[in-house]
Amino acid sequence: MKLLNDLTLEQKVGQLLMCGFHSQHADEQITRLIRDYHVGGVIYFRRNVESVDQLTRLSAELQDMAAEAGALPLMISVDQEGGMVARIDQEGMTQVPGNMALGATGNPEYTLECAHILGRELKNIGIDMNLAPVVDVNNNPLNPVIGVRSYGEHAESVAAHGVAAITGYQSQGIAATAKHFPGHGDTAVDSHLGMVTVPHDRNRLEQMELLPFRRAIEAGVDAIMTAHVMFPSIEPEPIPATLSHKVLTGLLRDEMGFEGIIITDCLEMHAISKPYGVAEAAIRAVEAGADLILVSHTLHDQVAALEAIVEAVRTGRILEEVIHQAVERIMTWKRKRCGQQNDHLVSLKANETVEATDVEPVDCTESTTKPTEPNESTLFKIASSSITIVHNDGLLPLDAEKDVYVIWPEVVQRTEVDEPWSHTESLGMALSQLRGRVREHKITTQPTYDEADRISADVSESEQVIVCTYTSAGHLPKGQQYLVEKLSKNHSLIVIALRNPYDLLEISRPGSYVCTYENTPAVVRVLSHVLNGGLQPTGSLPVRLR
């Protein structure tokens, strides 16, 4: 049985890295990282997923590779937040609602139920950590990166739903990750693209941004992810939280008492990589108090981060004791959540072996049961409790004797927080199952003005017009704004915000306005029944439209 002090410096530093790769099998990138650089963590993205069965085999393959290299079990993670951020959207994985849809229900029990389902399914395919829930309080309508990933703008509600999600995931053996500390909700810039500042004083931060994280810590959350955001009332130097000792050690560790894993958001995001470079940022993150360094994409940056940390220890910039403490925390987690085979476990203390009875084994290399079938009744129940009719000037339910024209935006552009679904169902398709005379025109989320003019001419004789809007950014795209305004001159519109409820702030008041918070198939099917008068939704806005 190995002892912690028997690990080389390179092996210890490897445990601090969580890395992504670009294939649906163990390609050269991840093979080199595991065998040559001893990385202890892997993150999956859509690019790694063909099917649930394939991903289960991939998890087993990677764990076998680590075992053959004499390494610890891997920490395998994914961003499976639910709703519009779901890296695994294949058959066999339940498409649970996203955070704002759950927030609109006003019922944290639904959040707990979804986390139970998702946690069980993730564990069955060899995943040990979900980089969720988002517990940012989204109180900025222009936030381009959080939005519906948040439970809403009320800190107490966000905290209650966050605790429910944490409880649900961890009851199934999945580490939950509260993010993005100290809070990314009140920002108008995407930290994937640039630096962000939250300028509020400490009293305001305590009441709003920090409250959900304090509750998460009280609930025993396994991990907390950092934000690449500057908080001058905590760190007076122009340093993002990810790289700030005052934020990660002074506030999160010492003051708030968090003893779990501190994981960085990806260091390749421009808020970090542009001003610092990934290698230097990796050193600074460790100095600040981070345990787990996330580098999601590029082999060059992943290797550079590993080698930079090793060199910083050798030159005395980072004390080896700092690395030692981080590895201890990671290995405590691996004993708790990812005990594979006792032969591959290292003791948590330098001079103490781990007895077999100390370990709660969870086999990460083989799925003994298939993922659960989608729980349609649960999804429909939650969807009907989340869909929100903001106002209705007598246009709903639809008149069965009149025709319907639906304008449906299709998501075709992939971003970090917005990905096209591998299987979708449009509103026109769903409505046509319930009634006759449904016409549908599909557009992109960035329609041209000329396209909007053509649609306006085509829709001129239609008696009931539904315009679905969609944005994953802080502003409704100009083409969609133009289309709504053009049509509203001659029609009383039913506008349905398929993602961002704040779309209403950028258009004239329509005849009816409905928020669904996501366009997942279950929501679209329930929405069709709502519009047709077969269901009465009970959702309430978790944000103010002001």
Image: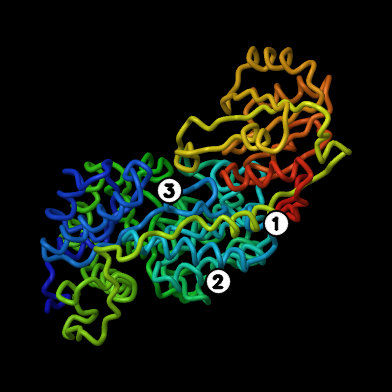
Residues tagged 3 and 2 counted as in contact (Cβ below 8 A)? no
Determine contact: label 3, label 1, CB under 8 Å. no
Q: Which mark is residue 282?
A: none
From what the image shows, is residue 336 above or below residue 402?
below
Q: Which residue is mark 3?
A: 91
Q: Which residue is most to the right?
A: 394
Are the two marked residues, 1 and 2, in contact with CB atoms closer than 8 angstroms? no
Q: Is residue 95 left or right of residue 503?
A: left
Q: Secondary structure at mark 2?
A: helix
Q: Earlier in the sequence, mark 3 or mark 1?
A: 3
Q: Is residue 402 above or below residue 277?
A: above
Name the residue tied to disc 1: 385
Q: Is residue 509 visible?
A: no
Residue that appears at 84% across and 36% down: 395
Q: Is residue 255 left or right of residue 268?
A: right
Which quadrant would residue 512 be assigned to in this image?
top right
**The residue tagged with tag 1: helix, strand or loop?**
helix
Q: Residues within 10 Å of mark 2 (few under 14, many from 20)?
A: some
Disc 3 or 2, which lies upstream in sequence?
3
Quadrant where the image shows the C terminus: top right
Q: Nearer the viewer, mark 3 or mark 2?
A: 3
Q: Could you tell me the amino acid type at mark 2?
A: Arg
